[in-house]
Image (spheres, rainbow, N blue to C red):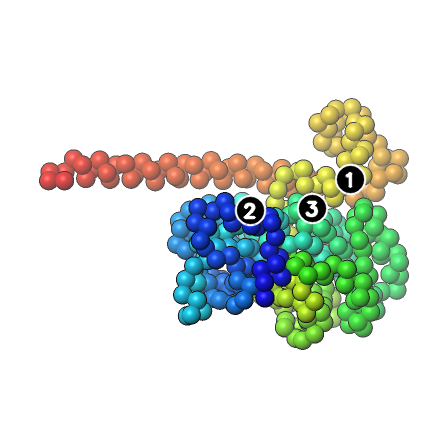
Amino acid sequence: MQLKKLGWSDFFEAGRSGLKDNDLTPARIIRQLKKIFWVHDGSHEYQAVLAGKFYKKAETPLDLPAVGDWVGVRGDKDADQVMIREILPRKSQFIRKAVLANTRPQVIAANIDTAFIMNGLDRDFNLRRIERYLSLTYESGAMPVIILNKTDICDDVDSAVEQVESIAFGVDVIALSVKRREGIKQLSTYFKSGQTVAFIGSSGVGKSTLVNLLMGEEVMEIREVRENDQRGRHTTTHRELFLLPGGAMIIDTPGLRELQLWGSDEMLTDSFTDIDALSGSCRFSDCQHDREPDCAVKQAVENGELDPERYESYLKLKRELAYLDERQDEFVRRESKRQSKVMSKMIRRMNDKRDKPGI
């Protein structure tokens, strides 16, 4: 297998040439279980561990490798184990705020070309959640495609598709039934050789089932959806990259029960293009579309031109991002203070040693 079949391109070649040590072997991370990684260099798969410098210098999880990353490795290939020495620059990264963390990001997948945002046409169907997924996907640099699964249990598929299209301008919306294997061929256009597609969505929407179907074998464990709430348990417990028979790659991710934003409020521009267009007619150029007078966005809501629920969703996401920004600033202040204390202690120890006789 060649590197190009794993998604290698001129972008990564340029990143490789910029490394201090360009004698490292390029490889792509295809699986991760806690601190153990598996990488593929185009001809062989190896188990890999991180060089110690990552744990010493990494300021946030963004500085650590994730599934989909291209890395530079070195080690004993005969023993099927190598060490990850460098991470090449990413062309895209799907990030959310880590669960239970105040200001810590979490990379869901790296270097993806297309993100399949999967929703079920059952109780999982939620336009507000789709808006959230779209915002994160646009921020990631990947192209979003919305997959509506379970057409076999939906009475009005056309209506559901229209509702999604009304909030996802210019985004492909595909309705299918994985259970009945209907509509799967519509996805073939996204699976070109060297392209990477990530499957993102809640538990129970059919991600792992679709992955198995596309792979032609059962590579992911599947559990039944609960009858009482149509929700699934986390079948996928780790992220893994698979190579499809046709040469494309897919990354299955654990079901995301909680999806908090990570980024600035600019990330809402692409997912709320209708509101962004209206904002140009607001009285104030920095209008927040909340309490300001002569707001074109609020006027559109009053006139029935803009869905009130979509407007409220937009405000909610803006408030969430503003709170995150505030917490990030607080984290930077705390971290700076902590680093200052550490440095002061080191200086005192050095001075104490210098003052002792015989040293």
- Front residue of this view, candidates 132 and 11: 11
Residue 200 seen in render: no
Q: CA distance from mark 3 to mark 2?
A: 24 Å
Sequence-wise first label, 3 or 1: 3
Of the 4 image quadrants, the one containing the N terminus is: bottom right
Q: CA distance from mark 3 to mark 1?
A: 12 Å
Q: CA distance from mark 1 to mark 2?
A: 33 Å
Which circle, 1 or 2, is nearer the viewer?
2
Residue drawn at x 67%, y 75% as measured from the top left: 217
Q: Disc 3 residue type?
A: Tyr
Where residue 68 sits: x, y (%)? 58, 57
The vertical placement of 359 against 206, above or below, is above
Where residue 256 sits: x, y (%)? 64, 58
Badge number at residue 45: none
Q: Disc 2 residue type?
A: Ala
How many numbered discs?
A: 3
Q: Which residue is mark 2?
A: 14
- Front residue of this view, candidates 168 and 227: 168
For residue 235, what is the image quadrant?
bottom right
Of the 4 image quadrants, the one containing the C terminus is: top left
- Front residue of this view, candidates 11 and 346: 11
The vertical placement of 108 against 211, above or below, is above
Where residue 172 sits: x, y (%)? 80, 53
Tell me: 96 left or right of 148: left
Tell me: 305 left or right of 168: right
Badge number at residue 273: 1
Q: Which residue is mark 3?
A: 138
Q: Disc 1 residue type?
A: Thr
Which circle, 3 or 2, is nearer the viewer?
2
